[in-house]
Structures are given as structure tokens and as C-alpha cells.
Amino acid sequence: MSMLKEAVKVPNHPLLVKKLSGPLPEAPPMIFDNETKDVVLEYMRLMKEKGITITGADIAPAPTEDRKGKK
């Protein structure tokens, strides 16, 4: 005696397709303008050790509440 009233449906194609992706590009570290002076100086010191010069243009404006949710 069968417990099912109708036949079980089987998909013709796989439901999940595994997409092969390459390695993720290394994102450069960021610093925002609302950080404390100590944090900014430490960031500049670390970047200087790596041979990267940091200027005021490299410091991004702090994200606001209205820009956080938009994607």
C-alpha cells in the first residue's frame, strides 16, 4: 500500500549550480574621517612600513545611516 497519492516529482536540472570563481581581489584597507587621531596615526605608520604614502585624499568620509542600507 502506497502512502503517496501522486508520484514524486524529480527535477530535470540541478537546483543549485556551483559557480567556479577565481580568488577574490585583495581590498586595500580603508580608514574613515571619524576615527580618532591615534587610529589615523597608527594606520599611517602601518602603511608607511609597507611603502605606501597616505594623504588626506585617502581618508574616506564616514558612512552615514542613510547610505548604509543602499546597495
Image: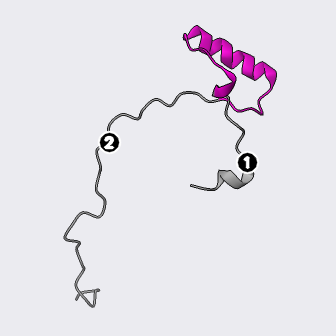
| Number of numbered callouts drawn | 2
Q: Is residue 35 left or right of residue 19?
A: right
Quarter occupied by the N terminus: bottom left
Frontmost residue, 7 versus 16:
16
Quadrant housing residue 33: top right
Q: Is residue 3 magenta?
A: no
Can you give x and y, in whole percent of width and height, for residue 53 in the image? 60, 14
Q: Is residue 52 magenta?
A: yes
Quadrant housing residue 58: top right
Q: Secondary structure at mark 2?
A: loop
- Up/down of 34 relative to 42, above or below: below
Q: Give the mark toward the camera: 2 or 1.
A: 1
Can you give x and y, in whole percent of width and height, for residue 63 in the image? 70, 44
Frontmost residue, 50 versus 6:
50
Q: Which mark is on residue 6?
A: none
In the image, what residue occupies the spot 67% across and 34% down? 60
Disc 2 or 1, which lies upstream in sequence? 2
Question: Which residue lies under the disc numbered 2?
Answer: 21
Can you give x and y, in whole percent of width and height, for residue 17 in the image? 28, 56
- Up/down of 48 relative to 32, above or below: above
Question: Which residue lies under the disc numbered 1?
Answer: 64
- The residue most toward the left is 12
Identified by mark 2, the residue type is: Ser
Identified by mark 1, the residue type is: Thr
Residue range highlighted in magenta:
31-57
Frontmost residue, 48 versus 22:
48
In the image, what residue occupies the spot 73% across and 21% down? 40
Q: Is residue 2 left or right of residue 59?
A: left
- Up/down of 6 relative to 12, above or below: below
Q: Residues within 10 Å of mark 2 (few under 14, many from 20)?
A: few
